[in-house]
Image (cartoon, rainbow, N blue to C red):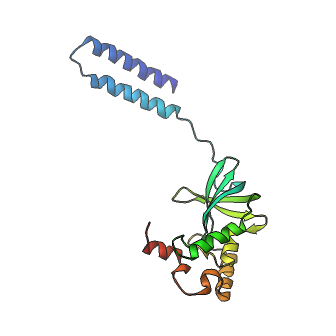
Amino acid sequence: MQALLKLLYDVARTEFSRVRRRKNSSPWIVGGLAVAVTAISYFLHEPKALPSATAKGAELVCTVKAVFDGDTLAASCPAGEVKVRVFGIDAPEMKQEPWGDRSREALRGLLPRSGPISLRVVDQDQYGRTVAQVSAGERDVGLEMVRQGRAILYERYNDSPVYQQAQAEAKRARRGIWEKVGGQQDPAAWRRLNPR
């Protein structure tokens, strides 16, 4: 690598000297070589990213910093702040009144104000959020949101029979979003009809 950089540097220096001697030569040659040397140097010496603390399978102990809605929060973790999408659930959007507010309040109620939460990283979503199974003590927060009827099972990503059973029980008991028929029961359909 070092030898390649030295060779490119020597070629650029030689070409620059030759261009300076010939006044009619195009400065584009020197400029092009300078850009090539800079680009090659950057790619050869680009620092390699360290393995992320939020890599798949990572388990983090964090504290809650903020709750944005019924399935998204910010957490303060040892490696810094992490925006978290709760795995396996889909909660009503904040503009789905009053269901969005109720869902966010339910999530706030399940999370400790100052104590630790556990994150088991599952993936990263299209918005750059860390998708994680969130636990407060021994309680799976996403499962409890479904059990309370404050979110639905996100079937596209979660095929857990435990979550399916919790949703069926919430429907039968008419808890949360299931207390009456309406669009609040399918946040994805609501998002399609109400794009951001």
Q: Residue at x 57, y 76 (%)?
A: 99
Q: Residue at x 63, y 66 (%)?
A: 87
Name the foreground residue: 82 vs 52: 82
Question: Which quarter of the picture shows residue 14?
Answer: top left
Q: Is residue 194 visible to the viewer in this orientation of the structure?
A: yes
Q: Residue furthest left?
A: 24
* Residue at the spot 67% in from the left edge and 68% down from the top edge: 107
> Residue 81, relative to residue 28: is it above or below?
below
How many numbered discs, if any? 0
Q: Is residue 84 above or below residue 151?
A: above
Q: Look at the image and tell me whether residue 161 can be seen.
A: no
Question: Residue 20: horizontal and vertical position, in percent?
Answer: 29, 13
When asked about the image quadrant of residue 141, the answer is bottom right
- Whole-percent x, y for residue 43 in the image: 48, 34
In this view, the residue in front, 141 or 98, is 98
On the image, the x and y values in percent for residue 100 come to 57, 72
Q: Where is residue 177 drawn, in percent x and y?
A: 60, 81
Quarter in which the C terminus is drawn? bottom left
- Going by the image, does 191 lie left or right of 59? left
Q: Give the camera-side residue of 136 and 115.
A: 115
- Quarter location, residue 11: top left
Residue located farthest toward the top when viewing the structure as drawn: 21
Q: Nearer the viewer, residue 95 or 31?
A: 95
